[in-house]
Structures are given as C-alpha cells and as structure tokens.
C-alpha cells in the first residue's frame, strides 16, 4: 500500500465468473493500484483467459476441488505482507480495501468485512436469518463479536496465515478462517460494508453449508492461544 511499504496481494478463487471478472479486476486496480492480483481458477469458461490477458497471475485448479481447497491454495500461494480476499462475482465493494489495509497497518492481523451490520437488500431473508443465528452461536461459543462469519472479504496478515493450520476440506471454510485466528490470540477487526447483488450463479449449497458452519463453530471450542 502507498506509503506503508506493505506488499499486498488480492487473491480470489474463481469458477465460471467470465461475466464479472474484468470489472472486478478493474475495480481492484482502481482501489489498490500497487497490489498484485492472483486467482485460483477452476472455470470451464473464459475466466482464466480474461484474467491472464489483464495481467493477473492465474493458478489453475482443475477439475474443481471446491471452495475450501481453492481458498486454501489462494491463501497459501499469495505472496506479500497482506492477503486480501473477495468473491469474484462483483458483490463486494473494492473501495473498502484501503480502509481494511489501514487497520492491518495499525496492528490488526485480520480484518473481516461484514455485510450484515444492517440487512443488505441483495441478501434473501432466509440467508440473513441464518447468518444472524451463526453470529449468535459464534458469540455464545467463542465470545467473538461479529455479524458475519461467512464474509468472503477479508484482509489477512501473511505472517498470521503462516502460523495457522485450518481444515480446507468441506464447506464453510470462511467460518474457520475467522474463528481460528481469534482463538489463537490474533487481533481481529470487524468493519461494515455494503453488499451488492451477484453477477452469475451462486455455488452455495445451503444445507451442507449450514451443517458445516456449526461443525466448524463447535469444532474450534478447544483451541487455545499459543501466543502470550
Ligand atoms: N476455484 C474455485 N472457485 C470457486 C469454487 N466454488 C466457488 N468458487 C468461487 O468462490 C467465490 C464464492 O462463491 P459464490 O458462488 O459467490 O458463493 P456465495 O458468495 O456464497 O454465493 C466465487 O468467486 C466463485 O467463483 C471452486 O470449487 N473452485
Ligand atoms: Mg459470492
């Protein structure tokens, strides 16, 4: 980021996002011109060609191995001091990236961009209600205050990621990527963002995602900080 000397990589996972990718890349470049962009791509459509033609680093993961495996690869292969993630479907506001980076500069290890500080018009009521239940459970079990454990928009300090071991298999990895660092004693910051309607089809399987959200919330109960 300008002035701070931090090297930033914006890492996205992509599956058949040819309708959105060029816009999302342009928006990222406008928001953080110095950042590198990486995609882990499992598309059958033109997404990887479009990204490569725009100078983005493309890692192919084909056939698709699911959200978790793709996100794992993205977080592990991104270079630099900070890794910013967002969906490649034009739902998240890239304008919020500089603010997220400022919080990292100020010493936070993870910034979670919450879509749910008020109800987003783009989110169906059932999803909103489910997210409130997940937030309540996360607070009850871990004491972590956030409205949005499923946000795909985050900034992670790379040295923190290097110290964490998450389970990349199964749905709802974002839940673990938020709660695990918090339990380990890293500094987690929540900011509110606006959320837009998706371009293209969702890959979300509601039932699987709900079951895995609770599995991950409960499975992390015993995690203790290894920092003092
Ligand atoms: N590489 C890769 N990307 C995926 C896979 N599944 C989903 N994605 C991408 O992950 C992001 C989030 O998925 P999305 O369908 O938007 O989930 P939603 O936000 O819960 O509706 C999008 O950018 C998808 O293209 C996968 O198996 N492999
Ligand atoms: Mg999405």
Image (tube, rainbow, N blue to C red):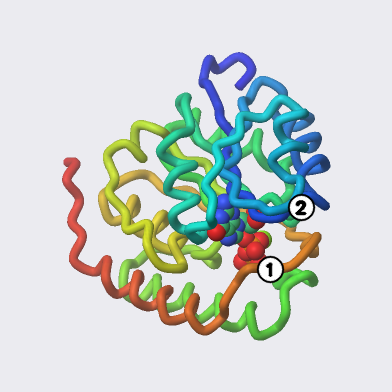
Given contact means CB atoms under 8 Å apart, are the residues at marks 1 and 2 in contact?
Answer: no
10 Å crowding of disc 1: few (<14), some (14-19), many (20+): few
Q: Is mark 1 within 8 Å of ligand 1?
A: yes
The quarter of the image holding the C terminus is: top left
Of residues 71 and 66, which is closer to you in this image? Answer: 66
| Residue 114 badge | none
- Circle 2 is placed at which residue position? 90
Tell me where residue 118 appears, x and y as whole percent.
Answer: 69, 69
Residue at x 78% of width, y 70% of height: 122
Q: Residue at x 61, y 26 (%)?
A: 36
Q: Quadrant of residue 164?
A: top left
Secondary structure of residue under mark 2: loop
Measured Cα–Cα span from mark 1 to mark 2: 12 Å
Q: Position of residue 190 (x, y in %)?
A: 53, 53
Identify whether 226 is placed above or below 77. Answer: below
Q: Quarter of the picture for ligand 1? A: bottom right
Q: Is residue 169 visible?
A: yes
Q: Which residue is pictured at 45% across the width and 58% down the height?
A: 68
Q: How many marks?
A: 2
Q: Horizontal and vertical percent for residue 22?
A: 81, 40
Q: Nearer the viewer, residue 65 or 202?
A: 65
Q: Residue at x 60, y 34 (%)?
A: 58
């Amino acid at each position: 980021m300008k002035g701070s000397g931090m090297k930033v990589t914006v890492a996205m996972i992509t599956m058949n996002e040819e309708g959105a990718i060029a816009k999302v890349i342009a928006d990222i470049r406008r928001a953080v011109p110095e950042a590198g962009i990486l995609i882990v791509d499992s598309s059958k459509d033109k997404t990887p060609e479009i990204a490569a033609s725009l100078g983005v680093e493309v890692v192919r993961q084909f056939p698709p191995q699911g959200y978790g495996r793709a996100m794992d690869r993205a977080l592990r292969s991104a270079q630099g001091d900070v890794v910013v993630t967002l969906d490649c479907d034009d739902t998240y506001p890239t304008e919020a990236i500089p603010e997220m980076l400022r919080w990292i500069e100020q010493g936070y290890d993870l910034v979670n961009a919450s879509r749910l500080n008020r109800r987003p018009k783009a989110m169906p009521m059932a999803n909103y209600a489910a997210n409130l239940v997940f937030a309540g459970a996360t607070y009850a079990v871990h004491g972590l205050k956030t409205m949005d454990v499923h946000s795909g928009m985050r900034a992670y300090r790379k040295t923190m990621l290097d110290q964490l071991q998450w389970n990349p298999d199964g749905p709802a990895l974002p839940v673990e990527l938020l709660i695990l660092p918090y339990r380990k004693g890293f500094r987690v910051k929540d900011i509110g963002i606006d959320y837009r309607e998706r371009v293209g089809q969702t890959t979300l399987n509601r039932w699987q995602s709900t079951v895995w959200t609770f599995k991950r919330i409960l499975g992390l109960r015993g995690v203790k900080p290894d920092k003092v």
